[in-house]
Amino acid sequence: MSHATSYELFINGKWRAASNRATLPVINPATEKVFGSVASATVSDLGEALASAERSRKAWSSRPVKERGEILVAAARILATKAVDAANDLSVEQGKTIAEATGEYARAVETLKWNGTHAEKLSAPIPLGPNRMIVPEPLGVVAAFTPWNYPAVLIARKLAPALAAGCPVILKGAEETPSAAVHIVEALRHAGVPDGVVNLVFGVPVHISRHLLSSSIVKVLTFTGSTAVGKQLATLAANNLQRCVLELGGHSPVVVCADADLAQAVPAISEYKFECAGQSCNAPSRILVARTLYQEFLSRMTEAARKIKIGPPDDPATEMGPMANARRIEAMQRLIQDAVDRGARIETGGTRLDQPGFYWPPTILTGVPKDAKVLHDEPFGPILTVAPFDTIEEAIEEANATEYGLAAYFFTDAANAKRALIDGLSAGAVSVNYLKGVSADAPYGGIKQSGYGYEGGDQGVRSFQSLKMVNGLGSFG
């Protein structure tokens, strides 16, 4: 994708420019140069998308579930054949390495396939006894808002279950990373999704959200992004009582207990933290280490961070590419300066690399006071804080000392510590001696300020269904 690239809207089965020809620039974060453009939808375009989705609703919801599932499985197969080019496009737009982008598309393919394979089962009536059953029914048109950090997998996690449930979707893709939405929508189009069932728009986010959510056509809002934006969207959705699925911010702790195997823990934390330059709501950000292991852990973690090769995302030797945009660089500078001003120490990293591109090195902070912003604001970048603890109770209290509750991790083989941490950590997901992305078959959601509702697994499809109670069946026969 060295040539200039233009991305269009997809409305009622047709690729098209915005009605007023307006576009927004697409910037390569490794060079800071504009290399393409994306169409910016007008109110007229959004109105057409709404009308198109509503026109398709009855036919899609009444289509045999087996056929809906087969279309998703076919789309997965088509996307898999395009994954090399799609991963290259994503790497150019977002800054993640080719290996990371390739892995993300593998997860997107898995998600489409899983939902297609399980569509029939999850739309089947659920018996409750001889005279009662629950009939799952599609809720209606979905407005799906996706971010730039993992666009391929998060688009798949919204589109696939909604389509499996029988709901048309208006997808608002990320303007910074439009190619992922285009590749997935194209795969669905070639797989046979009818006109109007999937519509794709880009543009000014606040204008799009206000217009879509003010329409009574939209029955469900699904959004992945910051807590602040999630609250704004939920407020808009309240006017029409649209169901909300919100996966919001995170500030994930890792508790490293006294018996932890550092040869396992340090590489696992380093790899998962610095993937996508730390721009993940699931990424660990606060490491709490048993005091007896603290110095050894800090030494190993700092060494691991320093060894990460930073460079152009298309270089096979690169282990971490640039951050996605200038806003993330400014956030890193702000959080680190605040921490240092309050007495924190920089063990490694801490300043932007002096070269073109939004490059920020892996950064480790110690001695961070509890009122520092980096311990409370989601870092969403390659910053780790490391601190010692003396008791499991102290570690749990510190781990829970944020408004977020998306993911938490710990390392121990001690049964008592495992039970205490599983019970005590406030998070939608807790992982033991393990840090990896969420699989397609698992329901995933946050608590506290990290959102509500579930994506993935059976619950991901249920998010787009009403469960109609049917009583007194015996009287019919």
Image (cartoon, helix red, strand yellow):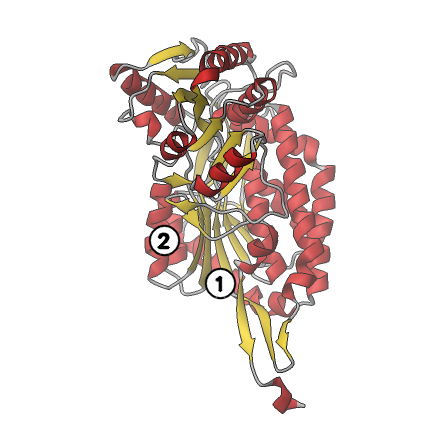
Could you tell me if the residues under marks 1 and 2 are in contact, i.e. CB atoms within 8 Å?
A: no
Residue lying at 34% horizontally and 60% vertically, measured from the top left: 238
Under mark 2, the amino acid is: Ala
Residue lying at 39% horizontally and 50% vertically, measured from the top left: 209
Residue 272 left/right relative to 102: left
Q: Quadrant of the C terminus?
A: bottom right
Question: Residue 234 has which mark?
Answer: 2
Residue 145 left/right relative to 332: right
Residue lying at 64% horizontally and 62% vertically, measured from the top left: 122
Front in this rendered view, residue 272 or 34: 272
Q: Quadrant of the N terminus?
A: top right
Residue lying at 60% horizontally and 55% vertically, measured from the top left: 458
Q: Quadrant of residue 326?
A: top left
User: In the image, residue 27 lies at what x, y percent?
Assistant: 47, 26
User: In the image, residue 64 lies at what x, y percent?
Assistant: 69, 67
Q: Secondary structure beneath disc 1?
A: helix
Decide: is 188 above or below 386.
below
Question: Residue 112 has which mark?
Answer: none
Q: Which residue is mark 1?
A: 51
